[in-house]
Image (cartoon, rainbow, N blue to C red):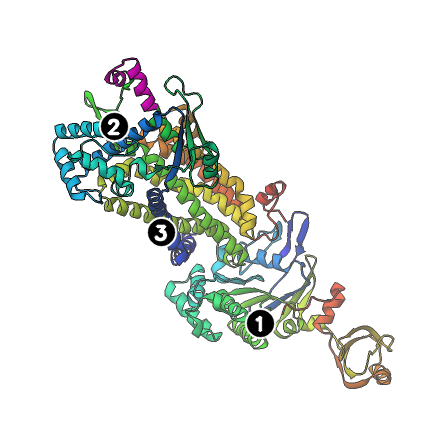
Amino acid sequence: MNRRSVGLVARREFLEQVRTKAFWIGALSLPLLGAGFGTLGALVASIDSVDRYAVLDQSGWLHDAIRRHIVAADIELALDALASEAGVAPSGTDRDALLADARAAIASEEGRTAFHRRAAELVFTLSAESGRIANPSLPVERFANWWVDNPSAVVDAFGGVSLARYREVSPARLDVAHLNALVEQRRIRGYFVIPDDPVRSGDGARFVTDNLTDQGLRRWYGLQATKVVQAQRMRERDIDPAVAAWLNEAISLPAAKPAGGGSESASDADFIAQWAPAGFVILLWLSIFTVNQMLLTSTIDEKSGKLAELLLASMAPADLMAGKVLGIGGAGLAIVGVWVALVGLGAGAVGDSLTFAAVLKPSLLAGFLVYFPLGYLFYAAMYCAVGSLCSTVQEAQSLALPLVLVPMLPFLLVIPVTNDPNGLVAVVTSWIPPLTPGVMLNRMADPPGILTLIGTTALMAAATWYMLRLGGRIFENGILRTGKPPSLRQLPSLLRGSAP
Amino acid sequence: MAGVSRSFGDVQAVRDLSLAVPQGSIFGLIGPNGAGKTTAMRILMGILAADAGAINVLGESDPRRIKSRLGYLPEEKGLYKKMQVGELVGWFGQLKGMARKDATDAARRLLAEFDLEERWRDKCDSLSKGMAQKVQIAATLVHDPDLVVLDEPFSGLDPINVEMVRDAMLALKARGRTVVLSTHIMEQAEQICDALALVDRGRVVLDGTVAELTGSDDTLTVEYEGPGADFAGLPGVGRVNDAGNVAELSLAPDADAQATLRALLDRVTVRRFDRTRTSLHEVFVRAVGRRPEPPVP
């Protein structure tokens, strides 16, 4: 191999890639798109539309109870929000007085608990007709009044309350025909039908809608109804709600990790570190695919641009291929560098250096530095071979389809391998060379034994070497071919260098 | 090249082909499309290996070992579109083993020779076809090779550029370099080449110096006026190559040219009447049995 020729080709390929605006747009677009989609998602969630609904209550009492329950739950939620963010206040008529009341109430744990209890008691006294409470002189009563009278202000102040997502309407007529018409006219998402005796049996309850995919409203109202009915059933059987709550209380098993002779609670950083290899696997395959696409395009350009023969008069085909693989691989590493730098800047911007440090563990970085070259070279040989046989990107796409599907497998393995890094799936697939880089990198959270590490890496290295030889042979005989790509039947003669 | 053969599958591109190119000469390879010229040139350059036979290029049996002494301009010519002209020519010089500075200096000198010095910083995709071809030739010659192989070097060039490239070849020859070229343009081959080989179906059909190939004065060149002249049956005339206003008539060995002229005057108005050697075109037609393909515009 002529190192000088390889170096010259590699340098030219690298510069040709990194000098273009398209390269930097491509390098920056992925993280920026990720950040953009994240922001857009949050924005969409924040401007989520309100689902309006009506209720046809045949019991005569349940919906009023549910309504009070919803208001109570929302007020509690708002008070919790006030408690954790004492500086945030609702806008609206009673702002200053309400803030003063709320701040006083949440000054101590005792005061907060008492305030919750009183608020709950008060809202339960709300009547469906007036929406007023008995004694408006109490500060919490003012709060409840404000709540009922100003739903939009409530939503502005406490975005998380149910009013922000679901709002009841009061139609002119509460009959099925009219409600169906409202559904068809899209004025309401749907309406609930409550049967005569929901405490005895829920049979006959239903949600009428023409949108069967959005289950949010149905589930939410069903949950509220269930809580109210359960409370009624407990009262009828003289069951203490506290006893019922105790009976239903789940056993919590918070994750912990061994520490010396005992254990300690797992932190967010620990969870992130556990999933970090999966992130690196995705980074690995994204970078390998991105770079190999560049390699494929460059090879086809060289062939269709009628440059190959001119170049082969100056160097061996193997030198040309090696230079291309190295130069474009270098450009690929530059892309990865940009991605990592942007993620680092992002983490720095949100001040989460602990999490970033947890992700960038030395074992992961070392794994990436070993498996990126091996994986890249393995697939680079295939992509170079395919590129040398094709004159257009369209031809290459159909020929390269199987080559795209095989490397997708590690993506499918990310979850099972992350969940059980030393399970049967992980152990077996570690020894299958096209999958080794992705699977072994994924296992780095709980690295296997040294023999497995060395064995799988050596096997992958041998497979990569063989693939480079095979790809080089096809490249050598394919780069000067004209016409359509060869059929499978012609491949042996192509490898012998005697194909037409 | 001695007894060189090369096949691709069932296609025998070159069969038992032997060529001897005198050092310091301009040697032409002529032949119809698919005759095996390009395959022969690729073998000569070490781009393809021969299935059989032996080659000796500048005293070396494996041309790959002396790539820095060889220059090659393939028939299908391309450039890196986004590279600057000067950078590209210098880069090819470096590929041939030149130091960066030497390659840059040589590129500057050659591009000036080809009237392209002002395009030094232009990207290759901004060049016209003729300019691009001159850049390709510059990239082929930048390292001052001992043997230059040019596959259809004149295709796509206008007459002024043809002259420029021809002068460059003559300059190479004057410096003792050897040039092998293929061309479809018989007149140019006749003018510039010291020796020629006519290749057909992978074999050398004829070879020798131009004088040897074009032989004795057995051709009449007639420039005439007259509608639809029919020269068949003229006394002493064999093959006729009539181009409309000018016709080449092959004379039989014992033919009387004066009798032919008299017969001609009965049929057309003769403006010029020359007894000349056989043209290369005619040699080609006689040897191959068909006309050469027209030059690619």
CA gap, disc 2 to disc 1? 96 Å
Please say if A180 is above or below B287: above
Which secondary structure lies at badge 2?
A: helix
Co-location on one chain, circles 3 and 2: yes
Residue for badge 1: B157
Residue for badge 3: A28
Residue A189, can we see it? yes
Categorize mark 1 by other alpha carbons within 10 Å: few (<14), some (14-19), many (20+): many
From the image, state whether disc 2 or disc 1 is nearer to you: 2
State which quadrant residue A271 falls in. top left
Please tell me whether residue A233 belongs to the stretch shown in magenta.
Answer: yes
**Horizontal side of residue A104 vs B157, given as left or right:** left
**Horizontal side of residue A325 vs A70, given as left or right:** right
Residue A115: % across, % down = 17, 30
- Residues shaded magenta: A226-246
Provide the chain ID for the residue under circle 2. Answer: A
CA gap, disc 3 to disc 2? 55 Å
Residue A412: % across, % down = 44, 33
Which secondary structure lies at badge 3?
A: helix
Residue for badge 2: A124
